[in-house]
Amino acid sequence: MSSWFGLDSTLIDRLVRRLGNDPDVDGAGVVSDAEAVREAFARAAWTMIAEPGDGVSGFVVAALGPAGALSAVIERAGPTELQRRILASGWPGAGTPASSDTDEPAAPPASRVLGNALERWRPRLVSADLVAACETAISVGARLILPAGPGWHSGFGDLDVHAPHALWLRGDPGAPVSARSIAMVGARAASGYGEHVTAEAAAGLVDRAFTIVSGAAYGIDGAAHRAALGSGGMTVAYLAGGVDRPYPAGHDALIRRIRESGGAVVSESPCGSVPSKWRFLQRNRLIAAASSATVVLEAGSRSGSINTAGHAASLGRPLGAVPGPVTSPSSAGCHRLIREYAATCVTNAEQMAELAGWSALDDTGEAYASVEERRVRDAMSVRSARSVDAIAKESGLSLREVTGVLGALDLAGVVSEREHGWVLHAGRA
C-alpha cells in the first residue's frame, strides 16, 4: 500500500513496529507483512473511534475485519451499504438484522442502529489524532496489544463482540496473562477494616503465586495493589483513561511502581483519553474477564465494584464477597452479593484461592494438577466452545496431549464437549 487513511504507508509501518508489533510472516496461512501492519493500525484506530464495549463496532469488525471495517467508515459507506458488506462477508451470524440497540448482535445490526453508530464514529476518525495518540504511546513506552498476541488474555474472548479491539499497555506484557489471577475490588471510601482485610488477603494470594488484578482506584483497589507490591508480587491495573494519564492523580506513584515492578498498566482507550463514568463501568468488564475469580472486599450498596461483580457473574467467573459488620453500610454491597448474586462468602486468602480453583497444594506449593492440565484449562473458556486444535495451539501442547487431558477433565466434571468444541465449567477455571 502506498497510502491509507490519508497517511503514508511508511509512517503507518513505523508506528506499528515501534508500538511493539513486528508482524510474523513465517508459516502457512499467515497474512503478508503489509496486511498485518494494516490490521494492527486499524485496531489502534478502532480503540479511538469506538467507545469501550461498543458491540456494534465489535460486530462490524468481526464481520469485515478491522481494516475492512475501518475502510468502510473512511469511505463514508452508508448504513445500507455497510449492512450489504456484512451480509456478503460470509461471517457466521450474518442473517436476520437485529431490531434494536439492545439486541445482542448475533445478526447484523439494523440499518438504523448502523446509521447511529456511523454518526458516533465519523467525528472521531481523524488521522492526525490517531498518529498523535500513537506517538504519545511510543514516547511513554506503551505497547499496542493485539488479540491473540503477547499480553492478550484469552478471557477477553468471552466478551464476544464487546471485547476490546486492542489494548494499550505499559509494563510487562506477560503480567496480564498470568495463569493465576484474582480481581480484588471494592469501595473507594474504604474503612480501616476493609483495607486491613484486603492487605492481608492480597499478601496471602501473592504467597500462593497469584497476580492481583484491580483498577488502581482509591480505597480497596489501592490497598490490593500496594499489598501485592509490598509482598514482592505481581499486580495489574486496568485504567479507564489512557495509560499516559495515571488516574487518580494521587496514585501516580503507585501506578508507576506497578509498571516498574514486573506488573502492567492497561487500557483499551488510547493515550490522551480522559477517564469518564462510562469508561469506568466498561473498564470493569476487562477486570472480570482477565481474572480467574473476582472478590469484592468491601462495598456499599452503590459501589462501582458491584458492576464488576455483575460482569464476573455474567461471564461465569467465580464470584466471592467478604462479609462485614451487619451494621456497616460499607459492607451492604458485599452482603447483597452473597444474598442475591450467590457470591461465595470468603474471609481469607486460602478461601479466595479455592474460589479460583487452586485449593490442592502440596508442600512445595505446586498444584496437584499437572502442568499440562493447567495449560489446557487456561486455554479454555466457560462461554465459547473451543476445538481441540484451538486448545492445542493456545496451550502449546500436542493434539494427543490435549485429547488425553480433556478426557481426564471430562471424567472429573471439569469440562464437557459440545457440538462445536469443549467448554470449561463455571467455577473450575
Image (cartoon, rainbow, N blue to C red):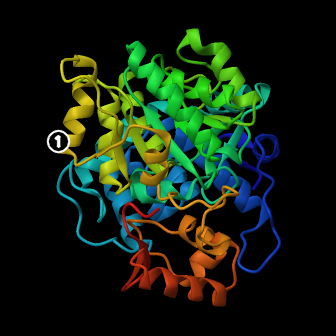
Q: Secondary structure at mark 1?
A: helix
Pointer 1: residues within 10 angstroms few (<14), some, or many (20+)? Answer: few
Q: Quadrant of residue 189?
A: top left
Q: Is residue 19 left or right of residue 63?
A: right
Q: Is residue 80 left or right of residue 268?
A: left
Q: Amino acid at mark 1?
A: Arg
Q: Residue at x 70, y 73 (%)?
A: 396
Name the residue at the top extreme: 250
Q: Residue at x 37, y 22 (%)?
A: 187
Q: Quadrant of residue 323?
A: top left
Q: Residue at x 50, y 57 (%)?
A: 359
Image height of 351 relative to 125, above or below: below
Q: Is residue 326 left or right of residue 29?
A: left
Q: Nearer the viewer, residue 383 or 404?
A: 404
Q: Quadrant of the N terminus?
A: bottom right
Tell me, yes or no, if residue 240 can be seen here: no
Image height of 218 relative to 236, above or below: above
Image height of 15 relative to 290, above or below: above
Instruction: Name the residue carrying label 1.
Output: 339
Q: Position of residue 43 (x, y in %)?
A: 59, 48
Q: Residue at x 37, y 53 (%)?
A: 318
